[in-house]
């Protein structure tokens, strides 16, 4: 059995005629927390969807546990997804179910466990994220951070081997962010799982991950351990890590010459 | 001359593009319908899912259906009496009200009201579930959203519609009775006996029920498809709900003509 | 909304819907007035049945005693053969008259039976020998015009 739970080779993906990924190569080793970072619109979330089998690559392959994802039939994909958990960007909780029912959802759908066993498991997961007391609330009554935590409990309800996080820190206050960072690391280690975190939060991510992939313009421009990348001299990495306004990713959107533009306006 | 030709070809191309677009969508909707039917097993194995949806589509539509029925029946009674009494056939107002309702107004008006109330609710709900990635989340949890979310709503709509149409017709007849007998003074016995003599179970009532079942299928699947296919933005969902009402109404009226010509001919 | 309240409302909804359906069938339609009792058949021949339809009522003294069954054309006698299904609890003598009446001025047509004085009763499969056709509007009008023309001619002759 390979040491990598996910292997991506020469992946190309086109969307609406535009080539989003142009030959991506990645290896996600077992048991590690790996971050995929890049600017907005660089196709990071799409990578998660390709791994999860929701999208088919145009070229190249994605292997999960040695199986090529897009070669599986529907039941094969569903089988594979039962070993994965995904945390969506704003939680994606089912708004018509309570917190308890949301976390119980994968258990009720995929296992034949009696309600008493399900109750114990749900309370266990909710306790792990610190929301056991909120079990009867409805998603509309939760704050953003709490909703994210419930979604996390739901994602790990079936003790998956691979957990994927889509921008888990987006729009959170510092305290909630700290909570999520803690949870990602501790859950990964407690479950013996592998985590992939798609994000652009440098500070929090570098503190908790084992390895980072930088994606820009459809290719992997840099990879390495957080301390390596912090010291990197590559222009894109430097701009990203230090949050510089201008660099390889330009400040100005493509536009004609400024002087020409102003003068034309005077004549028109 | 040339720019006009350009504009003409541009317009023609636009029409062609839109027609092809509609045909594509129709094909997608047909495939969606097929998937829903094929994956319907779960809706009946886990009946509580369907029952829950019957509550939201059927029970919550009751009030608008019953109130509308009452008013429609009362207007029919009024207008019917107004015209019939010129020919000395005021006794036939019961027949008029009952046949109009049972054959046409019951199924059609119920379907239009259903499309407006329950149909838009379904479209908005599913569109929002798509926009907030709930359907994606379900897929990633290896639960087929069509089996879990779409099919129970479909069967709930198909079951609710004939029940609502029957209640509409009954309430409408009652409304006609209220106007004709206590208010205007038509003979009560003549009202009911003429009605019973002239409304046939097989040709009128049953055909009306068949119509409302067909309308139920059409309205519900249109509402579900528009929601499922809506672009995951606020504007997309709002346009989808509008399309639900427009397409459902057109489908109902078109199907009504087709079914009526089959049933009469 | 917890499970049980929801189930209650759905149950009420479905029950009300089915009740409305049954109500439509019984009170509004003619499901109950379909004959449930035993009937026997007698045949009546008419030269013209006008607008008589199957399942039209057969009345005697104004009371519905049966329904019209089949209506056939006899190619040998060139008459209409109407099968009447009479309730077995009613017996009619052999010389009963069968007439086609119209209810109201423009209403539906029905068969009226006028009992004769014979001691023997009609049995299943018997024929009624005395029949009167339906009043056909066109014939009535032409008769009227004809008699008017006759009156005019006799007056002139006088």
Image: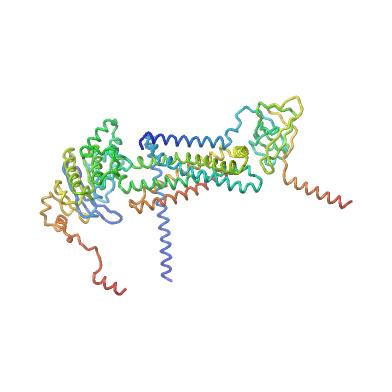
Q: Is residue A50 visible?
A: no
Q: Image point 47% across, 40% down: which residue?
A: B164
Residue furthest to the right in view is C158
Q: Nearer the viewer, residue C13 or A84?
A: C13
> Looking at the image, is A87 positioned above or below residue B9?
above
Q: Is residue C14 left or right of residue A23?
A: right
Residue furthest to the top in view is C119
Q: Quadrant of the N terminus of chain B?
A: bottom left
Q: Image point 75% across, 45% down: which residue?
A: C140
* Quadrant of the image occupied by residue C58: top right
Q: Nearer the viewer, residue A179 or B78?
A: B78
Expressed as whole percent of the image width and height from the top left, the position of residue A99 reads 28, 39
> Looking at the image, is A109 positioned above or below residue B89?
above
* Quadrant of the image occupied by residue A117: top left
Expressed as whole percent of the image width and height from the top left, the position of residue A201 reads 18, 51
Q: Quadrant of the C terminus of chain B?
A: top right
Number of marks drawn = 0
* Quadrant of the image occupied by residue A255: bottom left
Expressed as whole percent of the image width and height from the top left, the position of residue B173 reads 55, 41
Q: Nearer the viewer, residue A254 or A144?
A: A144
Q: Is residue C97 left or right of residue B206?
A: right
Q: Nearer the viewer, residue B142 or A107?
A: A107
């Amino acid at each position: 059995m390979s040491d990598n739970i996910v292997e991506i080779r020469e992946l190309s993906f086109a969307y609406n005629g535009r080539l989003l990924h142009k030959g991506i190569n990645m290896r996600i080793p077992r048991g590690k927390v790996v971050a995929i970072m890049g600017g907005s619109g660089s196709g990071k979330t799409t990578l998660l969807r390709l791994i999860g089998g929701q999208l088919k690559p145009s070229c190249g392959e994605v292997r999960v546990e040695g199986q090529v994802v897009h070669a599986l039939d529907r039941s094969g994909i569903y089988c594979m997804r039962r070993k994965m958990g995904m945390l969506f960007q704003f939680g994606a909780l089912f708004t018509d179910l309570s917190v308890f029912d949301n976390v119980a959802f994968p258990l009720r759908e995929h296992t034949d466990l009696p309600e008493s066993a399900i109750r114990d498991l749900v309370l266990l997961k909710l306790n792990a994220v610190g929301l056991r007391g909120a079990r009867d609330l409805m998603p509309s009554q939760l704050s953003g951070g709490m909703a994210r935590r419930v979604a996390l409990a739901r994602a790990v309800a079936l003790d998956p081997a691979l957990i994927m996080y889509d921008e888990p820190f987006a729009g959170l206050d510092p305290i909630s962010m700290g909570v999520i960072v803690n949870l990602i690391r501790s859950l990964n280690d407690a479950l013996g799982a592998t985590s992939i975190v798609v994000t652009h939060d440098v500070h929090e991510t570098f503190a908790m991950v084992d390895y980072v992939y930088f994606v820009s313009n459809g290719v992997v421009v840099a990879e390495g351990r957080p301390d390596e990348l912090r010291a990197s001299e590559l222009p894109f990495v430097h701009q990203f890590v230090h949050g510089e306004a201008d660099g390889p990713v330009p400040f100005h959107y493509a536009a004609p010459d400024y002087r020409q533009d102003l003068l034309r306006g005077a004549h028109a | 001359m040339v720019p006009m030709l350009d504009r003409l070809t541009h317009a023609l191309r636009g029409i062609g593009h839109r027609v092809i677009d509609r045909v594509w969508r129709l094909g997608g909707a047909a495939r969606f319908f097929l998937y829903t039917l094929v994956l319907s097993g779960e809706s009946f194995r886990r009946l509580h899912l369907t029952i829950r949806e019957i509550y939201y589509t059927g029970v919550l539509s009751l009030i608008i259906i019953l109130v509308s029925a009452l008013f429609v029946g009362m207007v029919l009674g009024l207008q019917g009496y107004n015209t019939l009494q010129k020919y000395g056939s005021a006794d036939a107002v019961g027949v008029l009200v009952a046949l109009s309702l049972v054959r046409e107004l019951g199924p059609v008006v119920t379907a239009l009201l259903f499309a407006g109330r329950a149909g838009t609710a379904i479209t908005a709900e599913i569109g929002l579930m798509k926009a907030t990635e709930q359907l994606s989340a379900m897929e990633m949890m290896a639960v087929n959203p069509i089996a879990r979310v779409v099919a129970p709503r479909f069967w709930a709509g198909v079951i609710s519609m004939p029940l609502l149409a029957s209640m509409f017709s009954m309430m409408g007849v009652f409304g006609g009775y209220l106007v004709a007998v206590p208010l205007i003074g038509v003979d009560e016995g003549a009202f009911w006996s003429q009605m019973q003599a002239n409304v046939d179970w097989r040709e009128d009532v049953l055909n009306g029920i068949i119509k409302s079942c067909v309308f139920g299928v059409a309205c519900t699947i249109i509402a579900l498809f528009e929601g499922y296919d809506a672009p995951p933005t606020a504007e997309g969902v709002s346009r989808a709900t509008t399309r639900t009402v427009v397409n459902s109404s057109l489908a109902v009226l078109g199907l009504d003509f087709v079914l009526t010509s089959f049933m009469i001919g | 909304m917890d499970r049980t309240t929801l189930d209650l409302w759905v149950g009420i909804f479905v029950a009300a819907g089915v009740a409305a359906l049954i109500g439509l069938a019984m009170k509004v339609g003619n499901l109950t007035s379909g004959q449930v009792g035993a009937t026997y058949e007698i045949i009546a021949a008419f030269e013209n049945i006008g607008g008589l339809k199957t399942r039209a009522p057969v009345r005697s003294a104004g009371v519905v005693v049966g329904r019209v069954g089949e209506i056939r054309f006899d190619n040998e006698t060139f008459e209409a053969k109407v099968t009447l299904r009479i309730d077995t609890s009613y017996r009619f003598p052999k010389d009963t008259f069968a007439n086609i009446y119209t209810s109201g001025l423009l209403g539906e047509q029905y068969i009226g039976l006028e009992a004769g004085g014979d001691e023997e009763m009609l049995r299943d499969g018997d024929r009624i020998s005395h029949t009167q056709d339906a009043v056909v509007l066109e014939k009535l009008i032409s008769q009227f015009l004809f008699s008017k023309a006759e009156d005019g001619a006799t007056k002139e002759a006088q």
